[in-house]
Image (cartoon, helix red, strand yellow):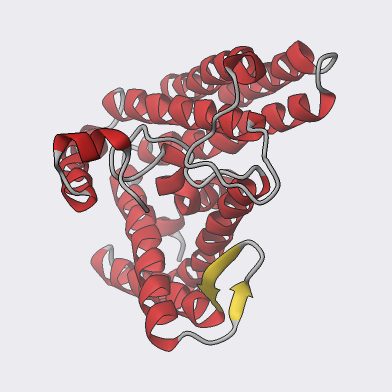
Amino acid sequence: MAPPADTRKSGLSNLQIRLISAAVLLPLVTAAIYFGHPLFTLFIAIFAAAAAWEWARIVANQKTLGQVTPVPSAPADRWGLPATLAVVATGLAVLLAGFGGYAGLGLLAVAVGAITTFASGVFKDAKLAAWQLLGIPYTAVPAMGLVVVRNDAEWGMASLLWIIALVVAADTGGFIAGRSIGGPKLAPRISPNKTWAGLGGAVAGAALVGLLTAFIVNHTNVWVLVLLSAALGVVEQAGDLVESALKRHFGVKDASHIIPGHGGVLDRVDGLLAVAVAVLVIGEWTGRSVLTWS
């Protein structure tokens, strides 16, 4: 990917920009995870709101046949109001979930925000309004999941670190296996670089994290966590494909340039969003952290 115009003017390579961005973000992410609520809740609310803004711009992009734009380029009158409503609804949902200690109030904010967003554009462009509506649960619910997981006083940090390590390992394992083994494509129309071997690598990487986590936290049923982690590796890859399909459908290469050298928030957390939803559903269903299963 060619570096953005501002990186070329500064004389910095894209790799240098990526490293600088990582050096700035990594301490912030680490501090937010370590200190937890309210810092973590505020941090996730900001990132979720940014992701909702990116979604609103992506689905408003007017694709030209055969053309892919670096980032969404639709005029603001197509996405301005829905993006504003989505940002408010998503940020509020995360804050309510975090400060309320449970997902109920946050889900109410998601529902109200989605309905309001759809109503604001349905008479102008019903199809676009429907796409704008979907962006709110897509970004808010996973973010709420991360906040609810971290707010667990006993297992919050361990569970969150397990999720993050799992996503990183699945991404890394998928990349290494896909590049070194190759073979049949997984979904060539959506993501031409993904292969079945890459999916296997992602599952293996996630399973390995489950195994290591089980020993670190003295999990009494190792294979339960290993198998669950492996399944979440598949979920992580599915989340990646969903975002790739979205961008391909609307003719966009990156969600935005909000993170210099890396693209947008959605470009970086697509797999994490899917895993966060899965863990949230499992946690709400069982009423306890996955790491406490016996």
* As drawn, 62 above or below 68: above
* As drawn, 9 above or below 241: above
Residue sitting at x 30%, y 45%: 3
Residue sitting at x 63%, y 17%: 82
Picture quadrant of residue 163 = bottom left
Relative placement, left or right, of 121 versus 246 is right
Q: Position of residue 76 (x, y in %)?
A: 58, 16
Residue sitting at x 54%, y 51%: 274
Q: Quadrant of the C terminus?
A: bottom left
Q: Position of residue 289 (x, y in %)?
A: 45, 50
Relative placement, left or right, of 118 versus 18 is right
* Residue 14 visible in the snapshot: yes
Residue sitting at x 23%, y 47%: 18
Front in this rendered view, residue 118 or 126: 126
* As drawn, 119 above or below 46: above
Relative placement, left or right, of 226 versus 285 is left
Q: Position of residue 139 (x, y in %)?
A: 54, 35
Front in this rendered view, residue 77 or 223: 77
> How many numbered circles are shown?
0
Front in this rendered view, residue 133 or 101: 133
Q: Position of residue 1 (x, y in %)?
A: 37, 53
Picture quadrant of residue 239 = bottom right
* Residue 221 visible in the snapshot: no
Picture quadrant of residue 8 = top left
